[in-house]
Amino acid sequence: MRMNETWVNALVLLGLVAVPGWALMVDEPFTITLATRAAILALAAVGLNIVLGIGGLVSFGHALFFGLGGYAMGILAFHAQTYSALDLGFIQIEGSTSMPVIWLVAMGVSALVAAVIGILTLRTSGVYFIMITLAFAQMFYYFAISWAQYGGEDGLSIYVRNGFPGLNTLAPIQFFGICFVVLCLVLLLNARVQASPFGLALNAARQSATRVEAVGLDPIKLRLVAFVLSGAITGLAGALFADLNRFVSPSMFSWTLSGELIVLIIIGGVGRLMGPVIGACIFVGLEHFLGGLTDFWHIYLGAILLCIVLFGRGGVIGLLTGKEGAHV
Amino acid sequence: MSLLEVQGLTASYGSSQALFGVDLTVAEGEVTALMGRNGMGKSTTVKAICRLIRASGGLRMRGQDLHPLASHNVARLGVGLVPEGRRCFADLTVHENLIAAARPGDWTFQRVAELFPRLEERASQRAMSLSGGEQQMLAIGRALMTNPRLLILDEATEGLAPIVRQEIWAAIRRLKQETGVAILLIDKSLKELSSVCDRAVILERGTTVWSGGMTQLSAQTTERYLGV
């Protein structure tokens, strides 16, 4: 049976709310934390899906922005909690435990780094782009390992979750609510971007850069804007992820995380609005249920990925709606 | 002043030279036929004008040298290309194809739909599901959405059914009569070109061998250079 994609999208979001709602009723806070983790990973993958799904750019270094968002949160919260200023040489900045402030910094830093990396990498394509983005992420990974001031290889613990005006962020359901609302807002933004002339031109540039140039559009500029937007969203997800765990470490920059974000999107549906959300829910579900049974649960994840790549190019959402995803 | 001036244009594909000295001019509101047998350099000339391949020689649009410009800036200067083989954005719908290319100006989706009513009927269909003729109409509509001063049509009716070819030619005539956009046409139908074009330029082995008014084109010349 083929389902309408709008209905599938609505059901997915409803399911993502229903699970923690049920967990709250039966007093299962860990399940709420799992749903929060799924929402945050979905948010990071929604960011990546802009460049991967719409723009056709296989960024194998998006963990870089996830890590930057995480460290933005960790550093600001660390300085706020230790009452010390962050000394940048030419300016001293006070720390902050306010989530909105941390989000803005996380997105700003990620966008700025994405702009610089984008300018340097977007003239390449294919395997070169994959390798260069991976190389940048690895540079930051090794830098974080050697950054002793903020925990080096051991990472940095934040003892109290950051605050949001009017909410108790330490209550799992309220923190889930924040993450879910942010996810919905970003999905809304993503839907608007996809349907806008910019999104359509970016999609067109994925299909043929030459033809896009022939109608007066610069594919490099289109991709750069998408890369910056994508980096900012993934950075925001990193800040939320660090708040969820109250911990940041170099592993947030690791290439395995970049790979997992790509896997989430492929499982859910490349270029589809709700593909990353479905992928994240399946990933977190498998991680929890199969991870409890065996340490080798990634084998099953690999099998699922293999089946989807071989038999369902549109991912789970493609199987449900009968439509193939974007051809990357 | 001519809208487009091409003088002594040369171009190569790697070590293989394709153009040895093309001269052509297109005036504002004029329809010019670029003619020649297969492999004589017509499409290469178009690609060079649009800066899709490297070329040297005189290449000016409204007096501005096109050589320093990237191809998207040539398009922004007012050169709208309908490439050979249509090449629509297959994953986008008809409406999305047109909106993606839209630039400020007189041409809107409604105006394109008025020119090609079939496109309005297929507005929500993906370009990949259209017939060849409809894809060609979409490719022309997409180029018009950039509000060009010069529209270049490279083999716009090639491989289409006769009835669809007639629709395309009717649209070209309407463009000539109603819009005043200059058109550079590459096509094999001498009969249709004769009825639409003001001027003609003939290429032979990458060089301009004849140019003049369409009415001056003699049977002897067409037989010699076009084989018809």
Image (cartoon, rainbow, N blue to C red):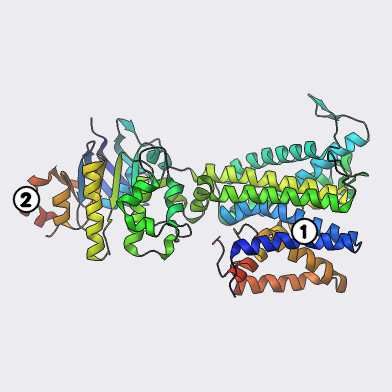
Letter of the chain that mark 2 sits on in the rendering: B
At label 2, the amino acid type is: Ser
Residue A174 visible to an observer of this rendering: yes
Question: Quadrant of residue B192 in the image?
Answer: bottom left
- Residue A321 lies, in percent from the top left, at 59, 68
Depicted A76 relative to depicted A255: above or below: above
The answer to whether residue A226 is left or right of residue A33 is left
Graded by Cα atoms within 10 Å as few (under 14), some (14 to 19) or many (20 or more), the crowding at tag 1 reads some
How many badges with numbers are in the image? 2
- Residue A246 lies, in percent from the top left, at 88, 48
Tell me the number on the disc at residue A328: none
Residue A142 visible to an observer of this rendering: no
Name the residue located 29 percent from the left edge and 50 percent from the top edge. Answer: B153
- Residue B179 lies, in percent from the top left, at 26, 41
Closer to the camera in the image, B92 or B204 = B92
Q: Mark 2 points at which residue?
A: B218
